């Protein structure tokens, strides 16, 4: 299932500002004397371009900062979660009886579910996000419980 795209706060603000500038420009041009309309239109057009340029620059700066933050967070999370001792404790023998005979989940999916289970995700979450059978997800969460890092 694909997520439905939506406007972020900055993008919504930019769209609202553009609409507001356009409305003010149209009102000012419509209410001004006919001889002054070219000058007023040019001034308001220049102001609109300047405002939109600033909004676009702010939006790009926010997006770049957000992207850098996400990359740093992903790197820090990978270092903290995906460690050799965490994967070394994977309970393959305990899970084997719960694996479906036909079309079992891949070891990659089970390792990833194990990591999430050791970091506090429960059986229902594992079942939904990794498409695991309920009894397998429950056993995985049960086995992971003693391996969870202490909460800070």
Image (spheres, rainbow, N blue to C red):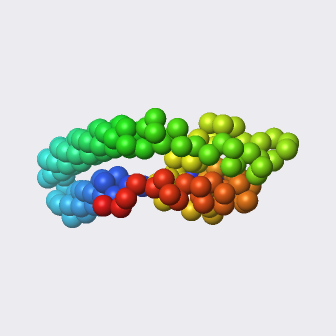
Nearest the camera: 123 or 51?
A: 123
Left or right position of 134 against 76 = right
Q: Residue furthest right?
A: 102
Q: Which quadrant of the structure image shows residue 141?
A: bottom right
* On screen, residue 142 above or below 99: below
Residue at x 64%, y 50% (from the top left corner): 130
- Quarter residue 67 falls in: top left
Drawn side of residue 14 relative to residue 141, left or right: left
List x then y, in percent, for residue 14: 30, 53
Residue 30 visible somewhere in the drawing: no
Residue at (62, 36) in percent of width and height: 108
Q: Of residues 116 and 130, which is closer to you in this image?
A: 116
Residue 25 picture location, percent across and down: 24, 56
Residue 141 shows in the view: yes
Q: Where in the figure is residue 21, as x and y percent of width and height?
A: 25, 56
At x 34% / y 58%, what residue is drawn?
9
Q: Nearer the viewer, residue 97 or 64?
A: 97
Q: Quadrant of the C terminus?
A: bottom left
Q: 53 left or right of 122?
A: left
How many numbered marks have been drawn onto this rendered protein structure?
0
Q: Residue at x 35, y 52 (%)?
A: 11
């Amino acid at each position: 299932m694909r997520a439905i795209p939506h406007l972020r706060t900055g993008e919504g603000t930019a769209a609202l500002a553009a609409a507001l500038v356009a409305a003010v420009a149209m009102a000012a041009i419509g209410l001004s004397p006919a001889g002054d309309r070219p000058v007023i239109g040019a001034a308001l057009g220049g102001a609109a371009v300047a405002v939109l340029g600033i909004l676009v620059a702010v939006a790009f700066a926010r997006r770049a900062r957000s992207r850098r933050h996400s990359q740093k967070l992903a790197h820090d999370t990978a270092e903290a979660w995906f460690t050799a001792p965490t994967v070394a404790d994977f309970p393959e023998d305990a899970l084997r009886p719960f694996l479906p005979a036909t079309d079992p989940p891949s070891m990659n999916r089970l390792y990833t579910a194990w990591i999430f289970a050791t970091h506090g995700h429960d059986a229902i979450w594992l079942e939904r996000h990794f498409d695991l059978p309920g009894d397998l997800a429950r056993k995985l969460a049960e086995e992971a419980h003693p391996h969870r890092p202490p909460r800070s």
